[in-house]
Amino acid sequence: MGPNPPSLEELTQRLIAFRDARNWRQFHSLKDLIVSLNLEAGELLELTQWKSERDFEREAEGADMRARLAEECADVLVYLLLIAQRTGIDLPTAAAEKIAANEAKYPADKAYGSAAKYTEL
Amino acid sequence: MGPNPPSLEELTQRLIAFRDARNWRQFHSLKDLIVSLNLEAGELLELTQWKSERDFEREAEGADMRARLAEECADVLVYLLLIAQRTGIDLPTAAAEKIAANEAKYPADKAYGSAAKYTEL
Amino acid sequence: MGPNPPSLEELTQRLIAFRDARNWRQFHSLKDLIVSLNLEAGELLELTQWKSERDFEREAEGADMRARLAEECADVLVYLLLIAQRTGIDLPTAAAEKIAANEAKYPADKAYGSAAKYTEL
Amino acid sequence: MGPNPPSLEELTQRLIAFRDARNWRQFHSLKDLIVSLNLEAGELLELTQWKSERDFEREAEGADMRARLAEECADVLVYLLLIAQRTGIDLPTAAAEKIAANEAKYPADKAYGSAAKYTEL
């Protein structure tokens, strides 16, 4: 890597090259990519197990926990990129559209300071 | 949005502005962001429920399922960005490092065509 | 139902009769039963979203949240029973064996008051 | 264990004794019990990763995979029992009520051979 972080396109290309060099396309059904994303999300969740919100937040300021969080977040992103590549989804555009939809669903004045679901506002 | 997809930094800024306009920072403990990422991953998984790999793959070629996949992938990305922002993780760099680590853990010749875990290679 | 809660065997028989009356055996691959158990576990987790441990604990004392918890726990048990039936697992015996294994893995004197994994004790 | 599998009540009592002998009640917030149930459900799901429904079904007939499935199912049951004990839920009764509700939601004639959600029937 150079000094700049890679783009999502570059990461996706590296992932596909990695997969194909190992002949792993055969295992990567879309369903299994989604199962795998869930497993990686679970590994992220495992880092919080038996810890209060406050204790975990404090631990996450340390280098050790931050490194573990970075690794698990990376794994989630990896599967997200593989799913997006398979299905032809542009992730940043999809996220921007979702944010716009949430801005409409949760008007700032009604949702201010409330954790209620939009259906309950 | 203009014709170009937003960068991850732009998306993060929009998310923080969205959160703060609603005074939602108080709910966003790191643990709950991770719980929420898991819930969104689960909604992605729910799209595959009761469908064989093949049937789901075919369904994902249709516009309707692709739109639902895009929405759930967007939700996962949203929480991933919020977690990264909170913990100071650079996601693309973390992913690049993880890919490099996997290249070392799964040498192409040993892992070729095998779904075994690296500890079993 | 009579005054006594049904046994796990009775529940399993009702579930199989329910499934077969709807010709749903075809959808119930073992993998999808496990996916479904994960989705139900996620619905249980969703009840805790954006709530501190303490607030959630207090809410769970109310009749409304207890009813929702009961429903989601029931859904998890339903899939657990279907998985056990399919694979020929006796759940209570498996749990008793697991408890015995944990008693050996986590000796009371070493594990007293510690949340560490057994590999770290 | 004697020749009979233990009842859910006996299992619950053993779990509480196990927990209290280690002074672990302090870690067992209801939210963390639910997080832990999700993590165990994820370990069950991990057994299916990269395997087609058919291959996994075949593997589950072998003694090795059945033992692993039994262990992960046991872990899920353990947390389900701890959650039920904490919240005062009678699991078999809750499951029986859920089955009855599903019998009403999915009439056998309408739901026959269909994987559609009850809202779509």
Image (tube, coloured by chain):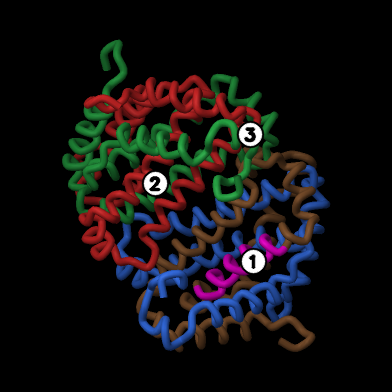
Chain colours: A red, B green, C blue, D brown
Residue B29 falls left or right of residue A46 = left
Provide the residue span drawn in magenta: D67-82
Q: Amino acid at mark 2?
A: Glu
Task: Give the CA distance from mark 1 to mark 3.
Answer: 26 Å
Tell me where residue D49 appears, x and y as whole percent.
Answer: 61, 45
Q: Are marks 2 and 3 in contact (CB under 8 Å)?
A: no
Question: Badge 3 local density, few (<14 within 10 Å), some, or many (20+)?
Answer: some
Image quadrant assignment for residue A91:
top left
Q: Which mark is residue D71?
A: 1
Q: Is residue D70 highlighted in magenta?
A: yes
Q: Position of residue C73 (x, y in %)?
A: 56, 64
Q: Which residue is mark 2?
A: A72
Q: Is residue A100 found left or right of D60 in the rendered image? A: left
| Depicted A104 relative to depicted D113: above or below | above
Marks 2/1 same chain: no
Residue depicted at x 57% and y 85%:
D14
Callout 2: helix, strand or loop? helix
Q: Dot 2 falls on which chain? A: A
> Which residue position is annotated with label 3?
A27
Image quarter hosting the N terminus of chain A: top left
